[in-house]
Image (cartoon, rainbow, N blue to C red):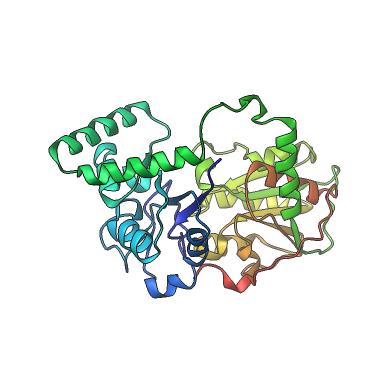
């Protein structure tokens, strides 16, 4: 397993998910050198095997392209200024940050020209075939120089030498009980009861309303009235749970009306946010939903607890499935946490 540092050069201050559209950052490179780039500089110095490039566009460095297609980002900043010599890969090129403007073939050629050694198209066979044809055509025409192709092949071969694929590992261990226990154990240690309050533990006999700002990825599969993954986990422990979800970037009035209705009829409110500290609309809606019987669950970054106040505040530091499992255990009293937060809540992304 080759360690990969991501998402270079940082996602910084944007509520936009590149799965949905292209995030654009106006911050200066000089400021990023001592903030966003600090962990990447450390990873480069430690000889990390690979670095993954994000689709975010940083206007101060690259006025035209997302970072995945930017020679200024990959060649000038990462290779030259930071001296990184390992493998450079893209984030998935099927995200809408790329597909809304560039076709699969052209985006792949641009990324290769920018200096990416491997290109990730992780879902669609038709895209993969188009990318193959486009790269082959660019190589044959000379648009993609042979020297650049050779350099990428060297990086790939170097990685393969250090992380051989053979003998093949036992893939039967994937999602084994032991591995799932490790993942859940790590998630449990990440749960922080930031503000105790008087609402926990929740009891199966209570009428609990769960209002969740859905993840950018999950919301695409959700329909009005459908249940999120987190709500489904909680329902196994709280049979009287009523739940609804809101768009994390632009909640519509119908969603807010449903949230208000179940809020009024409940004994306890669980409000789950995702990056409200960098989404003014989400923050405003959340503030209106919070009252004295609200337990705030900050999914993703913890900085929501720096801008929202509630009777009880729980931090998960991530919204993976194990994190949501651990959060549900903490909410009903099956898990007690002594973990402390080691970053000031006022230091969220600028």
In the displayed orientation, state which residue is furthest to the left.
141
Asked whether, in this view, residue 329 is left or right of residue 144, the answer is right
Q: Relative to the observer, which residue lies in front, 142 or 102?
A: 142
Q: Relative to the observer, which residue lies in front, 91 or 23?
A: 91
Residue 150, percent from left and from top: 28, 42
The answer to whether 161 is drawn above or below residue 323 in the figure is above
Residue 330, percent from left and from top: 79, 51
Residue 70 seen in the figure: yes
The answer to whether 224 is drawn above or below residue 174 in the figure is below
Asked whether, in this view, residue 92 is left or right of residue 262, the answer is left
Q: Which residue: 50% across, 41% down? A: 162
The answer to whether 58 is drawn above or below residue 206 in the figure is below
Q: Which residue: 58% across, 72% down? A: 347
Residue 315, percent from left and from top: 70, 58
Asked whether, in this view, residue 11 is left or right of residue 154, the answer is right
The mark tally for this picture is 0
Residue 95 seen in the figure: no
The answer to whether 161 is drawn above or below residue 81 in the figure is above
Residue 230: image quadrant is top right
Residue 274, percent from left and from top: 58, 55
Q: Quadrant of the N terminus?
A: top right
Q: Relative to the observer, which residue lies in front, 24 or 70?
A: 70
Q: Which residue: 28% across, 52% down? A: 114
Asked whether, in this view, residue 66 is left or right of residue 38, the answer is left
């Amino acid at each position: 397993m080759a360690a990969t540092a991501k998402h270079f050069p940082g996602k910084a201050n944007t509520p936009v998910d590149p799965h949905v559209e292209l995030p654009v950052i106006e911050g200066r490179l000089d400021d990023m050198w001592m903030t966003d780039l600090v962990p990447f500089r450390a990873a480069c110095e430690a000889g990390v095997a690979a670095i993954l490039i994000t689709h975010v566009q940083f206007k101060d460095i690259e006025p035209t392209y997302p970072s995945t297609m930017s020679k200024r980002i990959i060649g000038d900043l990462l290779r030259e200024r930071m001296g990184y010599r390992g493998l450079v890969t893209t984030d998935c090129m099927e995200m809408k940050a790329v597909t809304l403007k560039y076709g699969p073939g052209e985006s792949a050629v641009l990324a290769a020209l920018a200096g990416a050694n491997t290109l990730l198209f992780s879902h669609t066979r038709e895209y993969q075939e188009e990318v193959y044809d486009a790269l082959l055509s660019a190589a044959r025409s000379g648009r993609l120089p042979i020297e650049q192709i050779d350099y990428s092949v060297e990086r790939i071969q170097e990685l393969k030498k250090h992380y051989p694929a053979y003998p093949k590992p036992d893939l039967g261990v994937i999602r084994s009980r032991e591995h799932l226990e490790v993942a859940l154990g790590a998630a449990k240690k990440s749960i922080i009861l930031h503000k105790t309050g008087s609402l926990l533990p929740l009891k199966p006999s209570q009428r609990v309303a769960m209002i969740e700002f859905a993840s950018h990825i999950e919301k695409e599969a959700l329909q009005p009235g459908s249940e999120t993954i987190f709500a489904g986990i909680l329902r196994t422990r709280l049979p009287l749970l009523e739940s609804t979800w809101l768009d994390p970037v632009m909640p519509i009035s119908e969603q807010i009306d449903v949230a208000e209705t179940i809020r009024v009829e409940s004994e306890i409110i669980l409000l789950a946010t995702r990056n409200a500290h960098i989404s003014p609309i989400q923050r405003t809606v959340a503030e209106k939903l919070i009252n004295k019987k609200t337990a705030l669950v900050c999914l993703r970054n913890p900085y929501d607890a720096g801008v929202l106040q509630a009777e009880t505040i729980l931090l998960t530091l991530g919204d993976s499935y194990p994190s949501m499992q651990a959060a549900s255990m903490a909410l009903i009293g099956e898990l007690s946490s002594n973990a402390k937060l080691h970053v000031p809540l006022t230091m969220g992304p600028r």
